[in-house]
Image (cartoon, grey):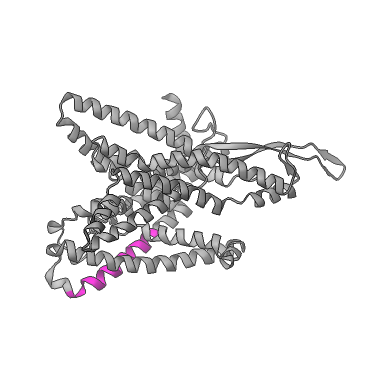
Amino acid sequence: MKKFVQTLRNIWSIEELRSKIIVTLLLVLVYRVGSIVVLPGIDPNKLDLSSAKEGLLGLFDTFAGGSFSNASILALGIMPYISASIFMQLMTILVPQMQKLQKEGDSGRKKINQLTRYLTAGVTFLQGGAYVAYLQGVNRDALIESYAPYFWVSTVITLTAGTLFVMWLGEKIQDKGLGNGTSIIIMVGILARLPQSFLGEFAAKQTRGGGGLLLFLIENALLIAIILGLILLVQGVRKIPINYAKQIIGNRQFTGARQFLPLKVNASGVMPIIFAQAIMFLPTLFSFTSFETGQGIARIFNDPSNGWYMLIYAVMVIAFTFLYTALIFNPKQMSDSLKQSNGFIPGVKPGQPTADYIGQVMDRITLPGAIFLAIVGILPGIAQQLKVTQSYASFFGGTSLLIMVGVVLDTLQQIETHLLMRQYDGLMSSGRIQGRQAAATASL
């Protein structure tokens, strides 16, 4: 406890770090205040969007921190920007022109960021129109009649401006604050629902008497164990030994160094779960048809606790893990970098054999990582089958928990870096904290 207090003092004594923390907290506070401001033309007393907390809309509402179900001016949150960023990331991998633009350095990244902003505005405009149609269909009584002629235009403009404002907040947190701004906004939105979900689960278990309280304690112990396992997944790496040949610079000879090439067990991060969820939501479109079979399919794919849903979902997560890892992981480029820096893997010839070896190792560690990621993805459905309330079950795995663990590790890693730069002790006495970015961007 004494060391913990001293660590907090060290953090607060660093002026730059203290300023970053204060700026981050203030910008997050602005975001949370905006999430409770209701759209113009809606009577909040008559608002009832309980259906927005289930299925696809429930996931969207989780990422928006409850703004979606509250019909807030920030109802769409940061998700349109996330969708645009994912699309642009895939384009930089698949389109040669975009790859060339990315290799132009800082100027190329600025152009890609500008294209992402334009795409975000377009996506938000389309989603805003869909959200207006949803409000008019589900909550017609909450709409103010005198404001009806202007409701569509004003709401779409307000939602677009709100998303762009949230995007700006994320960029300001990135520049002036601490951590990745977009990730922190998503994490804050997810955590905003944790207290209510926690109390709801506690109340549900209280109705079962003394045995219910014991079950509640067991549930929380399991949640902590899942978080610990997820930390191992996020930080897990396979270290390949690298030797560097002796170099002669001038009249001096430098002996070869021995380092490691870290390969992440889960190199694809949260992307396979996001892609799998997007595909799993497509069959729910059958619910808009009049066919009974379509409605049955929609019920299966809209229920995370359904056995068929979990099976198909797990298979798709594993498949997308291998697919996305193959897209972002380039063994040939790593092999060329090692060759240029006079590095080699002991017992492996430079060039193509090194690339083949790195690719084989990556394939072997990706399989257990993909299986573990699939288990994490279906854990909320398993929790619901074990009678955990739906809102609290969402914290037992899936995208929400993976994002929270990753963002917390990245933020702690940045804090630890500031401490070590000032010759303070780090946050962990057993070793350095490794976030997602540390292992992903480790240089050869």
**Which quadrant of the rendered structure holds the N terminus?**
top left
Asked if residue 126 can be seen in this view, the reply is yes
Image position, residue 36 (x, y; %): 24, 55
Report which quarter residue 358 is drawn in. Answer: top right
**Quadrant of the image occupied by residue 70:** bottom left
- Residue at (52% x, 38% y) in the render: 434
Q: Quadrant of residue 405?
A: top left
Give residue 401's position: percent from left, percent from top. Answer: 37, 42
Magenta range is 149-168
| Foreground pick, 352 / 409 | 352
- What secondary structure predominates along the stretch shown in magenta? helix
Residue 225 versus residue 130 in the image, above or below: above
What x and y, as percent, mark residue 201? 22, 36
Residue at 55% across / 65% down in the picture? 95
Q: Which residue lies furthest to the bottom in this view?
A: 149
Name the spot of residue 94 as percent of width and height, x first: 54, 62
- Whether the magenta-drawn stretch holds residue 388 is answered as no
202 displayed left or right of 337: left
* Residue 235 drawn above or below residue 78: above
**From the image, which quarter does the C terminus lie in?**
top right
Q: Can residue 14 be seen in this view?
A: no
Q: Horizontally, is 123 left or right of 344 in the view?
A: left
**153 within the magenta span:** yes
Kindly identify the residue that appears in the image at 33 percent across and 68 percent down.
126
Residue shown at the point (73%, 36%) measured from the top left: 346
| Residue at the far right in the pictured view | 251
Total labels drawn = 0
